[in-house]
Amino acid sequence: MLRFHRNEQIPYMRQEQRKKQIAILGSTGSIGTQALQVIAEHPDRFEARILTANNRWELLAQQARQFKPAAVVIANEDHYPTLRQALSDLPIAVYAGADALCQVVESAEVDMVLTAMVGFAGLPPTIAAIRAGKPIALANKETMVVAGELINGLCREHGVPILPVDSEHSAIFQSLMGEVSPIDKIILTASGGPFRTFTREQLADVTPAMALRHPNWDMGAKITIDSASMMNKGFEVIEAKWLFNVEPERIQVVVHPQSVVHSAVQFADGAVKAQLGVPDMRVPIQLAFSFPERLQSSFERLDWFSMHDLTFERPDTERFRCLALAYEALHQGGNAPCIVNAANEIVNRAFLEERCAFLEMPAIIERTLQQTSFIKQPTYEDYLATDAEARRIAASLLSPQ
Ligand code: NDP
Ligand code: MG
């Protein structure tokens, strides 16, 4: 039997712990910058080992100066010379290009990879990290939407855990802590976005500026538009299926405009466990970093006496067709979710740039789903090909300007 004398250090005691070395893919974004705030709050526990960005090289350089990672990567190679110059006085390796993202996560010193990049671009480095045996803090939901089955298979093969960062999935994960019984139902809450109460006629004329004003969350532009169309919630249904191994019929989307109940799980006996809190992404980010422990935080607490109305509504898939399309893709299986994701990336960008109307988005996604080659059991290469094909088709369906 293992015994410790009073004066001996227990090996797993806090003082003995090596600081967790975290690679943040997408450190300049909304999730990335909040992850750095978490690291700054716990300098005794976490260190930013690798930081990456796509274009915002100045912010990346500033972050590198503050957090002193071993390496930084700028995905857009055009910014490489400027970034290198900006960091030339520091002992920080500077790399560029999408392949470099896949290579840096494999570094032996990295203990966890936070995937906070946006879109399909997050898939290759996430796969590289899993193959290298790195635990994943998953924010980049598009990875699970596109290739959930493949990702789960790789995680099993390499013994890699995925810690959810998406607030709803973190809430589900937290509701499952300590449970050994199967899930009866997932209650996936949705704020409903800025257009929750709009009629179809009103939706026809909404602008990007209106869509970017999310009532509860301050997020990157792409996910904010996805929240306004409710494609974000559709993606979260797909993400929940793969993360928690539940069939879509057992995932109920519930519109809850106050975003206090972050999601819940119902069990066989009818008991429901939920996780509540002030909407603040730093809470799930921190838990993904510190799990199974919970760490102290300075984040705002819920004020129970100011919460007068917590309301819950059924989602309207007639007005928010994107949600229905995500369910449809999930039922079709194979590469259908990958098609919907690619088409959505095209229309999302086009809407932001005022090249596509709000209600045109689901129409183009639906047609892309019909026109792109269906593959029942896609390989990684199939996903790459599907993504390219669906983007091409969706782009061709945009009205000429
Ligand atoms: P942002 O747009 O704010 O940030 C995206 C980050 O990824 C930036 O660092 C950006 O670099 C980088 N990036 C974008 N495209 C590429 C690319 N092609 N190659 C390499 N790096 C790239 O997004 P969010 O932080 O809002 O979202 C990140 C992910 O987390 C998304 O998948 C989103 O769905 C998910 N998520 C976000 C939440 C939120 O509250 N924001 C909540 C739940 C999930 P640069 O700054 O240089 O452009
Ligand atoms: Mg979410």
Image (cartoon, rainbow, N blue to C red):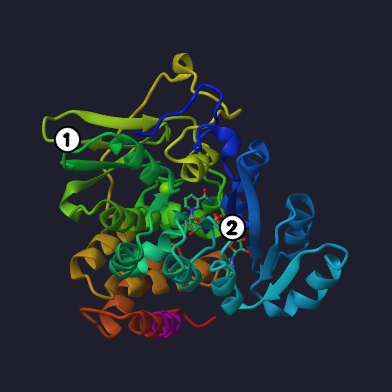
SS label for mark 2: strand
Can residue 94 be seen in this snapshot? yes
The answer to which of 286 and 239 lies nearer the viewer is 286
Secondary structure, magenta segment, majority class: helix
Q: Residue furthest right?
A: 89
Neighbourhood count class around disc 1 (C-alpha, 10 Å): few under 14, some 14–19, many 20 upward? some
Q: Are marks 1 and 2 in contact (CB under 8 Å)?
A: no
Residue at numbered disc 1: 267
Give the CA separation, mark 1 to mark 2.
35 Å
Viewed as shown, does residue 2 lie left or right of 28? left
State left or right for residue 7 relative to residue 150.
right
- Assign the N terminus to one quadrant of the image: top left
Q: Which residue is mark 2?
A: 24
> Which amino acid, mark 1?
Phe
> Position of 298 compared to 86: left or right?
left
Which residues make up the magenta segment?
A: 387-396
